[in-house]
Image: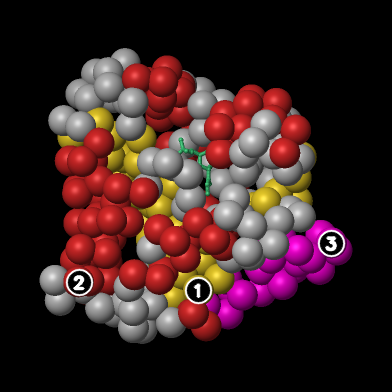
Amino acid sequence: MRILKAKDYLEMSRKAANLIAAQVILKPDCVLGLATGSTPIGLYQQLIQGYQQGNLDFSQVKTANLDEYKGLTRENDQSYYYFMHQNLFKSINVKEENTNIPDGTVADSANECARYDEIIRTLGGVDLQLLGLGHNGHIGFNEPADSFAKGTHCVDLTKSTIEANKRFFASADDVPRQAYTMGIQTIMNARKILVVVNGEAKADIVQKAFFGPVTPQVPASILQFHPDVTLVGDEAALSKINL
Ligand code: F6R
C-alpha cells in the first residue's frame, strides 16, 4: 500500500485528483468507481478545474458509483445521484449515459442489485475505485458485519452511519434506513483503489483499518489484501500511523 501524506484537505484533494487525472489520461475510456460523502468534494472540484483548463477529457470515461440510499428519488437533494450531478457530472463532459449509480427508487432489491452487478460486469470492471472511509470502517455502505458481502446488496444502515449522515438531513429520522451498495468483492476486484481521508476524527479508524487485523468488523481492513491501494490523507487523519 502506498500512503501519501498531505498537509491539509486542499493538498489531499489535489494529490488524489492528480491520481485520478493520471488514470483518465492513460486510459481515456477507463471506468472510474466513484464515492460520495464530504471527503471527495475537494478532489471533484480539482477534477472540474482540470477539465475547465483543458487538461482533462471525460468524454469516454465511464463511472460506477458505490452506493445509493434506498427510497430516495434522483431529485431528492440527499440522493447520491443528485450529489454526483451537483458536485461533478454537471461540470465536466462525462456523458450521462456513461454514468451509473444504483437506482434507489427500485423497491425490488434483488432485481436492482443484479442489474447493477451486471452493469459493472458489462463495463469490464472498475479501473480505479475511489473510496472514503466511514468512522466505523465502512466502505461504500458495507457496514461492520460477521462476513464480507460479495456483490451489490441492500443494507440496513447502522446507528453510527445514520448518526454520521444525519447532518445532511433535517433530522436523524429523515435519514433513509437502507441503501444499495457495491459489495466488498466488487470493490476488491477494482484494478486500483484510492482511499481518501481527512480530519482527526478519522485517525483511529485509519490506524485500525490499515494496520489492524483484517476482519469484516472493520470492512476497510480487507483493503490490506488488495495489490494496488493508495491512501491519501491529511496530517490529522494520518496522525496515528507511523510513516
Ligand atoms: C459514500 C460512501 C461512504 C463514505 C464514508 C465517508 O459513497 O461510500 O462509505 O465514503 O461514509 O464519508 P465522509 O467522506 O463524508 O466522511
- The first of marks 3 and 2 along the sequence is 2
Please name whichever residue, 169 or 5, is drawn nearer the observer in this view of the structure: 169
Q: Is residue 157 in sight in this rendering? A: yes
Q: Nearer the viewer, mark 1 or mark 2?
A: 2
Label of residue 52 in the image: 2
Amino acid type of disc 1? Thr
- Residue most extreme to the front: 170
Q: Is residue 173 magenta?
A: no
Task: Give the residue displayed 61% in from the left and 75% down from the top.
Answer: 119
Label of residue 99 in the image: 1
Label 1 and label 3: CA atoms lie apart by: 21 Å
For numbered disc 2, what is the local secondary structure? helix
Local crowd size for mark 3, using a 10 Å CA cut-off: few (<14), some (14–19), many (≥20) = few
- The first of marks 1 and 3 along the sequence is 1
Task: Give the residue displayed 29% in from the left and 51% down from the top.
Answer: 43
Label of residue 107 in the image: 3
Label 3 and label 2: CA atoms lie apart by: 38 Å
Q: In this view, does 121 lie above or below 16?
A: below
Q: Main secondary structure of the magenta part?
A: helix
Q: In which quarter of the image is residue 57?
A: bottom left
